[in-house]
């Protein structure tokens, strides 16, 4: 008795699911036409259609509120800027630490004069690299 | 200007294009979030958070799907996060706007609106999202499965269960 009830329930569920799929234009399972057009199925279809009408009440836009999209964009831009600044600051601190520790290792392992030699070298070479790069970047941003 | 062109301009930092893009898709997002949340104040917060996330991640958007679909996906995640942090909701007492109807019609429709909204809000968040996307926006099962990140079979069964539950509740509350 229990088995026949569960078969009946699962069958009725299958029909209901098929009718719901049909309502929403999705692929339908193959269900026996006799079952699909049975009284039970037709009753469910009627209920489904009435429920759809009721559920469509929510299509009305009753809550009127304003969203300032431009202000959100500005807020987004400022968050992006602050994130970029934070990232650059962390990179600066990390690279400074690396350079200073490399210097410390070099002084301990090689000689203290390495510091003076490298400083002189940087003072001569750095402007030759940094100035052309910054000029090129400025020109690029102008165009 | 079509959507893809606007998206490309927005990705290149054009604020006006981004603003147009957001405004064009605001109504669909607003409708979805209001139905999901049932509270205009909370809906407003969720929409603002979702739009802010969209602005911050616009470069990650790939125009395989519609922009509105991407916004809905973000809003769904923002709402999920909200639910994780705060449990429970309260249906708003805002009343329907009078569009020149009779007072009796407004009262009846207001009552029905609230009852239907209550039924939908009683559904678990995942089933509610599936039902709203399918019923009110006509998304395909495949699209819904991409929006809420779950298999198509799960989307299908969630919709079936949601619809059956809604019918049962409408009958129980004698709204039909």
Image (cartoon, rainbow, N blue to C red):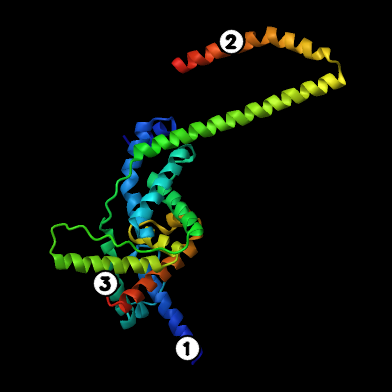
| SS of the residue under disc 2 | helix
Q: Crowdedness of circle 3 by 10 Å Cα count: few (<14), some, many (20+)?
A: some
Q: Is residue B90 left or right of residue A47?
A: right
> Does label 3 or label 1 sit earlier along the sequence?
1
Measured in 3D between alpha carbons, the distance from the residue under mark 2 to the one under mark 3, in whole angstroms, is 76 Å
Residue mark closest to the camera, 2 vs 3: 2
Q: Do discs 3 and 1 share a chain?
A: yes
Query: Residue A41: horizontal and vertical position, in percent?
Result: 33, 78
Q: Crowdedness of circle 2 by 10 Å Cα count: few (<14), some, many (20+)?
A: few
| SS of the residue under disc 3 | helix
| Chain assignment, label 3 | A
| Residue displayed at 31% across by 74% down | B170
* Residue A15 visible in the current orientation: yes
| Residue displayed at 44% across by 15% down | A142
* Residue A53 visible in the current orientation: no
Q: Crowdedness of circle 1 by 10 Å Cα count: few (<14), some, many (20+)?
A: few
> Does label 2 or label 3 sit earlier along the sequence?
3
> Does label 1 or label 2 sit earlier along the sequence?
1
Q: How many marks?
A: 3
Q: What numbered label is drawn on residue A57?
A: none
Q: Considering only vertical position in the picture, is A87 above or below A112? A: below
Between residue A104 and residue B26, name the one nearer to us.
A104
Q: Name the residue tied to disc 3.
A: A50
Query: Residue B143: horizontal and vertical position, in percent?
Result: 43, 54
Residue mark closest to the camera, 1 vs 2: 2
Q: Considering only vertical position in the picture, is A113 above or below B10? A: above
| Residue displayed at 39% across by 30% down | B14
Measured in 3D between alpha carbons, the distance from the residue under mark 1 to the one under mark 2, in whole angstroms, is 88 Å
| SS of the residue under disc 1 | helix
Q: Name the residue tied to disc 2.
A: A131
């Amino acid at each position: 008795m229990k088995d026949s009830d569960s078969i009946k329930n699962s069958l009725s569920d299958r029909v209901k699911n098929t009718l719901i799929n049909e309502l929403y234009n999705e692929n339908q399972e193959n269900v026996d036409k006799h079952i699909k057009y049975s009284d039970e199925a037709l009753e469910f279809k009627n209920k489904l259609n009435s429920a759809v009408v009721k559920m469509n009440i929510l299509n009305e836009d009753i809550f009127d509120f304003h969203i300032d999209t431009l202000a959100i964009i500005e807020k987004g831009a400022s968050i992006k800027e602050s994130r970029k600044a934070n990232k650059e600051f962390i990179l600066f601190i990390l690279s400074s630490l690396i350079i200073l520790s490399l210097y410390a290792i070099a002084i301990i392992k090689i000689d203290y004069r390495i510091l003076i030699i490298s400083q002189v070298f940087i003072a001569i070479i750095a402007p030759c690299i940094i100035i052309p790069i910054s000029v090129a970047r400025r020109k690029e941003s102008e165009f | 200007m079509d959507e893809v062109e606007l998206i490309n301009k927005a990705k290149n930092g054009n604020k006006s294009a981004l603003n147009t893009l957001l405004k064009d898709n605001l109504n669909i997002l607003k409708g979805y979030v209001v139905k999901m949340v049932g509270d205009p104040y909370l809906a407003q917060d969720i929409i603002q958070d979702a739009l802010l996330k969209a602005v911050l991640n616009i470069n990650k958007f790939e125009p395989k799907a519609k922009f509105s679909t991407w916004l809905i996906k973000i809003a769904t995640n923002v709402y999920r996060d909200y639910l994780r942090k705060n449990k429970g909701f309260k249906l708003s007492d805002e009343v329907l706007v009078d569009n020149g109807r009779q007072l009796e019609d407004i009262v009846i429709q207001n009552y029905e609106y609230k009852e239907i909204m209550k039924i939908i809000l009683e559904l678990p968040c995942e089933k509610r999202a599936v039902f709203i996307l399918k019923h009110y926006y006509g998304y395909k099962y495949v699209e819904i499965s991409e929006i809420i990140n779950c298999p198509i079979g799960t989307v299908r069964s969630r919709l079936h269960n949601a619809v059956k539950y809604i019918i049962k509740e409408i009958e129980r509350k004698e709204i039909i």
